[in-house]
Image: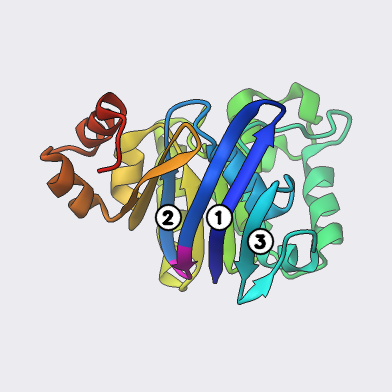
């Protein structure tokens, strides 16, 4: 479904992505991991068409998509930081996205699932950070998109909401969708991901399954394997 080849991006003198190559990924949960500043969010935004790379290619369903935008109708996106119009009420925000996407939605089910009924008439400016994050989750999952991109989806969530997010991810995965996630919560990644890509200084230092990563690093836990990559600062 998505293939990336020789992707490069710099902001001024800062090299953010360096010759990124990701072979065809078409379903399951892909976790993009790495320390702050490793290029994770920039990579996601390149896939989304929000950042234009300096060179390289991105293909969606075998079509080159850099500079094109219609393919984004197949994507749903949950950003790390929300920037909703604060004068809108929550139900107006959901209606706005429904009107823009003009597709069948399941927001009512999600609103109930995350206990947002009493917040629907509140202005965005009056919502807590956790409630905004739940609204962010509803927006990401309410459209039946074949690709869902989640940038730090666990931020600010209570344990119950986190459990519900895990269930949503597994449900959509079982439908044959591709879900791309970034997160610093390693236990969360261990539970939901099928494949891991680890970025360090804009380079891919590992791409493969959790099991193979543990074997290559000689570690028994994913967090220790990742620490090993960072400490060694070389391709495993």
Name the element at disc 1.
strand
In space, the residues marked 2 and 1 are separated at their CA atoms by: 19 Å
Question: Of residues 189 and 11, which is closer to you in this image?
Answer: 11
**Nearer to us in this view, 190 or 10:** 10
- At 46% across and 73% down in the image, what residue appears? 176
Q: Position of residue 76 (x, y in %)?
A: 65, 57
Q: Secondary structure at mark 2?
A: strand
Q: Which residue is mark 1?
A: 6
Alpha carbon distance from label 3 to label 1: 22 Å
Mark 2 highlights which residue? Answer: 30
Q: What label sits on residue 162 in the rendered view?
A: none
> Disc 3 and disc 2: Cα gap in Å?
15 Å
Residue at the location (86% across, 35% down)?
Answer: 88
Along the polypeptide, which appears first: circle 3 or circle 1? Answer: 1
Q: Is residue 3 above or below residue 115?
A: below
Mark 1 neighbour density, 10 Å: few (under 14) some (14–19) many (20 or more): some
Q: Provide the residue span drawn in magenta.
A: 23-27
Element marked by disc 3: strand
Point out which mark residue 75 bears: 3
* Residue 25 vertical placement versus 229 (above, below): below
Q: Quadrant of residue 219?
A: top left
Provide residue 59's location: percent of width, then percent of height: 62, 68
Q: Is 164 in front, or is 156?
A: 156
């Amino acid at each position: 479904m998505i293939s990336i080849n020789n992707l490069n991006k710099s902001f001024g003198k800062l090299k953010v992505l360096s010759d990124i190559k990701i072979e065809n990924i078409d379903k399951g949960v892909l976790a993009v991991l790495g320390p702050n500043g490793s290029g994770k969010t920039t990579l996601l935004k390149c896939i989304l068409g929000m950042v234009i790379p300096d060179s390289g290619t991105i293909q969606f369903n075998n079509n080159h998509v850099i500079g094109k935008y219609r393919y984004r109708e197949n994507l749903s996106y949950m950003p790390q930081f929300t920037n909703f119009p604060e004068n809108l009420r929550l139900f107006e925000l959901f209606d706005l996205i429904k009107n823009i996407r003009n597709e069948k939605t399941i927001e009512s089910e999600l609103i109930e699932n995350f206990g947002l009924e009493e917040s629907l008439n509140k202005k965005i400016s009056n919502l807590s950070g956790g409630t905004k994050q739940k609204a962010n989750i509803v927006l990401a999952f309410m459209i039946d998109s074949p690709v869902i991109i989640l940038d730090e989806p666990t931020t600010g969530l209570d344990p119950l909401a986190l459990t519900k997010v895990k269930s949503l991810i597994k449900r959509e995965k079982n439908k044959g969708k591709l879900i791309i996630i970034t997160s610093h919560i390693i236990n969360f990644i261990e539970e939901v991901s099928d494949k891991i890509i680890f970025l360090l200084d804009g380079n891919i230092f590992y791409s493969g399954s959790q099991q193979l990563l543990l074997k290559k690093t000689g570690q028994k836990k994913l967090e220790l394997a990742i620490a090993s990559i960072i400490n060694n600062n070389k391709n495993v």
